[in-house]
Image (cartoon, rainbow, N blue to C red):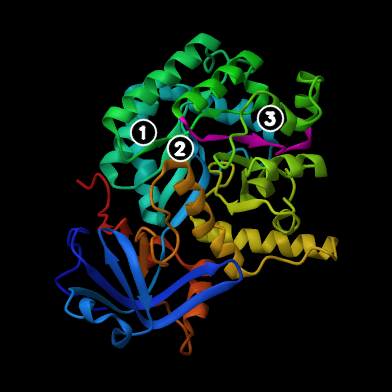
Amino acid sequence: MHVNAQAGRHPGNRMLYVGDIAFTSMPDRLVGIRRGVVAVENGIVSGCYESMADVPADWQDVPRTDFGDALVIPGFNDLHIHAPQYPTAGLGLDKELLPWLETYTFPAEARFASPDYARIWYRRFIQRMWEVGTLRFSAFATLHREATLTLARLAQESGLRPVLGKVNMDRNGSEELSESTEESLDNTVAVIETMRSETPDIGYIVTPRFVPSTTPELMRGLAEIAQRYDLPVQSHLSENRGEVAWVRELHPECASYTDVYEQYGLLRDGKTIMAHCIYLDDEEIDTLRRHDVTVAHCPQSNANLTSGIMPARRYLEQGLHVTIASDVDAGHVPDMNRHIAAAVAVSKLRQTQYADETALRLPEAFHMATKEPGRFLAAATGQAPAGSFEPGYAFDALVVEPMTSPWELSVAERVEQFIYTGTPANISHRYVAGHEIPRPFAE
């Protein structure tokens, strides 16, 4: 591959990027352009062209970066990941959700009370996000104020563009992982205020862990904070049958798990992520659609913890926004290509059980890990959308080197091969809003 000397110029300058371009402009359409050109100005895509001959005249003399026969795709966007659970990925996956939380997750998160421990592991987590090409993400931290700020500061330093939140939980935690309602709310406000002054590129997202961990008083307080600061919200919903039954016992006054979040003001219109959502009834689906909630589908996690299979096709047909997410560490790897493949695979399993639910196609799943979550992050943060090479999108890109094949592949086939067999070693360059991002914290 040849990359000319203009690579890495400041995005304030116009730049042209040449390579085998692939992105999904629509869920059912993968655009593949052999030796295509993406025009970028101030970090934002100005246009995407079939060849240099199609580039406007006033761009013909603009410096260009030629990636040769490499594949250029949008960076991945992951809307559900637990940053402090990265150290325990791959452990305890013979358990179901609630025993797994008690045995592995809560003890692991309690260790982030140590600032030194938090810094070591959050550095490793961010480096791993960079490696796998997840350039933007929505992360749960822990309930610890200082550790959450450590994650935000490291993210700011890295050049990646996540949103993240201090976890809130004032009931049903553990002796080592608990906080009062007042502490939870006060520390949330303190983190928000500090991040607004110190980490301007990192968004805050209000993060009640899930209904069993948050009292009504805490949920009301978090809803007020989200409203006051105009912030998005993320949580879990209907991941496991035992969890759903527990919520019913805790809140008999509410019609459903979804109704709890609605009654306490935590379904912010167009600014809410709910992860898993496996066991929703039609009324709950209507509620999520009415509030324009984005659903994070975590197929690897749901298989690992024997939670079930989200009916992604049915939700899409009923008008829900559905994205694909890793849910590390219930999902055992953060690599989004693996989760795209898993989403397609489990949808095929559902098709064998439900004849009226057709399986996801690869372009749809790719769209659910790039453009669709990028749409949510733009709405939630006010930044330019990411996840496509259409005009107006931030130039977030991965450059994927050619992989071994016995014959010449189309651009679409090369995307498919990378999704199913690619590794971080295949990614040679990573761009966020026009900036090439080097490996964070390299010694």
Cα distance in 3D space between marks 2 and 3: 27 Å
Q: Judging from the image, what secondary structure is the residue with disc 1 in?
A: helix
Q: Residue at x 46, y 27 (%)?
A: 166
Give the residue type that dot 1 points to.
Leu
* Percent of width and height locating residue 269: 59, 38
Residue in the foreground of this view, choosing between 233 and 109: 233
* Percent of width and height locating residue 125: 39, 42
The residue where tag 3 is placed is 262
Callout 3: few (<14), some (14-19), or many (20+) C-alpha neighbours within 10 Å?
some
Q: Quadrant of residue 162?
A: top left
Q: Residue at x 48, y 55 (%)?
A: 335
Give the residue type that dot 3 points to.
Glu
Q: Is residue 275 visible?
A: yes
Q: Is residue 70 visible?
A: no
Residue in the foreground of this view, choosing between 252 and 318: 318
* Percent of width and height locating residue 13: 18, 63
* Percent of width and height locating residue 386: 42, 56
Q: Which mark is residue 151?
A: 1
Cα distance in 3D space between marks 1 and 2: 8 Å
For the magenta stretch, what is the residue range?
230-242
Q: Is residue 240 magenta?
A: yes
The residue where tag 2 is placed is 83
Please tell me whether mark 2 or mark 3 is closer to you in this view.
3
Is 297 placed above or below 254 here?
A: below
Q: Is residue 201 left or right of residue 359?
A: left
Question: Sequence-wise, which precedes: disc 1 or disc 3?
Answer: 1
Is 272 placed above or below 1 here?
A: above
Q: Residue at x 46, y 89 (%)?
A: 408
Q: Is residue 399 magenta?
A: no
